[in-house]
Each structure stands twice: as structure tokens, then as C-alpha cells.
Amino acid sequence: MLLENITMPEFIEGLKKTTTVIIPFGTIEEHGTHLPLSTDTIQAVEVARRASDQAPAFVAAPIHYGVCTSTAQHPGTVSITAETLRRLIRDVVRALYKHGLRGFILASGHGGSLHYAAMREVAEELIYELADSKFAVFAIYDMVKWEAEDLIETKHDSHAGELETSDILYLRPDLVKGRDTESYPRRTDPFVARDKFRLWPTGVWGDPGKASPEKGEKSIELMTGKLVEVIKTMETFEP
């Protein structure tokens, strides 16, 4: 049940079936020269929609902006602060809670460490504030990272690489503009870099050339299956 598409009576009827809601998180963030800026959002929303068709759950409108650090200087990336994200999550969850929802699945298509930490922090806070609330917080790729290794050929594949390109080739081939070249960022750990674009001008981590829609279909099926498991477990989970 996509919240943005249903009416008030449909929402009330939906509450008779479930009090669980999936909140997809994405970004407007560079994904090389070949993938759309909304890549993370497309994946999170589609996985949430497919999972809700298999197990009862509401799907909230996506939170389309996220915390982007290593890509903040790349053309097109629109990053928000961690505090902005935390405030937005608090407001959205509290509003949904007032309308009777109790199980909150925060599913992110973006895996940035500061982004994920902000999501987790708010869940840890609200579970004590909101009586009877339940939370699950994860990045959708992290749920299938072991299984996905059998799908891809590129070692250490990541951002805008083989797997993400495969997913968008499967979900929205009309938005894929050719293929970027294989590349990887220059790491500076433990130092914090100021000029991140200089260290990672392509914005690609992996080899998009090895991507295929067939790999994308399998990847999306894996993530959808994991999310269905989370939805079903939410009903009986005791926090």
C-alpha cells in the first residue's frame, strides 16, 4: 500500500491488516556518468513496493535526500546534514505513529556511514519515546551482501559499480546512459580529506561494464525477499 496513492478510507482499512510501514530512504547523489542521481531512491522504493505486495505493509513516500560525504562535491549531489535527516525522521515517524502505525522499517538505498548512523540513532531514541513502537533499520544492500557476492564478478564492488548498474538496468533501463569505466577511489584513511572530488573524480567504485539486467533482477529479488522476512518478523518481534 503506497501511502501517497491511497485515500483516507483505504488507509483506515489498511490498518486492519497491518500497523507496519516501510520508509524508503534514498539520495540525490552522483552515480558516475551513466546512472541517474536518484539511483538509491529508485532501488529502495522498488524493493519496498515489491515486498509490500508479498507481505502486508504500508510504504511511505521516500525520503529522497540523504547525508552524502564522499560525493558531496560531485556535480548534482544534494547532501543534507545528519541533523536535518534526524529531524526529518523524527517528524515523519511521530506523525505516522499518531495515525496508528507501530512497526517502522527504515530501509535505505544509500549506505553512507554517517547517513546510516543518523537513521539508527533516531530509532534508538524513538523506541523509548513511543510506546509499543518497533524499529528495523538497515541499508538494503547490507542485507544481501553475502548472497550478492555470488552474482557479481567485480571484487569489492560498490557505488555505481557492477551491482548498482545491474539493478538500474533491470528496473529503469531508460535511465542508464551507457557504461562508465572501471575505477576506484583513492583512500586516505585514517585522514579526512577536504578535496574529495580530486580523490574520486569518476564517482564509480567497481566495474559497470560487467553489469547486466539479469544480475539486477536476481539482486532485486534477493533484497525483496530479505525485506519480506523483516516485515513478517516485525509482527512478532518483541523489542
Image (cartoon, rainbow, N blue to C red):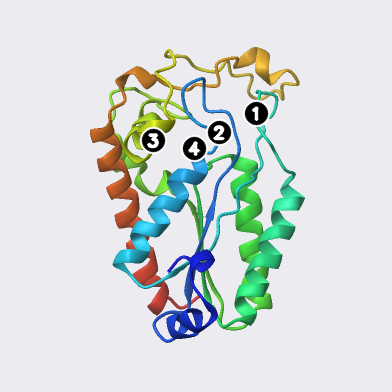
Q: Which residue is mark 4?
A: 39
Q: Which residue is mark 1?
A: 76
Q: Nearer the viewer, residue 60 or 94?
A: 60
In the rendered image, residue 166, in percent from the top left (x then y), is placed at: 34, 32
Q: CA distance from mark 4 to mark 3?
A: 7 Å
Q: CA distance from mark 2 to mark 1?
A: 7 Å
The 10 Å Cα crowd at callout 4, few under 14, some 14 to 19, many 20 or more, is many
In the rendered image, residue 137, in percent from the top left (x then y), is placed at: 52, 58
Q: Residue at x 55, y 46 (%)?
A: 26
In the rendered image, residue 238, in percent from the top left (x then y), is placed at: 46, 78
- Kind of residue sitting beneath label 1: Gly
In the rendered image, residue 64, in percent from the top left (x then y), is placed at: 60, 48
Q: Nearer the viewer, residue 183 or 165?
A: 165
- Kind of residue sitting beneath label 2: Leu
Q: CA distance from mark 4 to mark 2?
A: 6 Å
Give the vertical position of 91 relative to 221 (above or below): below
Residue 208 placement, left or right of 75 = left
Residue 223 placement, left or right of 91 = left
Q: Nearer the viewer, residue 51 or 185?
A: 51
- Kind of residue sitting beneath label 4: Thr
Q: Which residue is mark 3?
A: 168
Q: CA distance from mark 4 to mark 1?
A: 12 Å
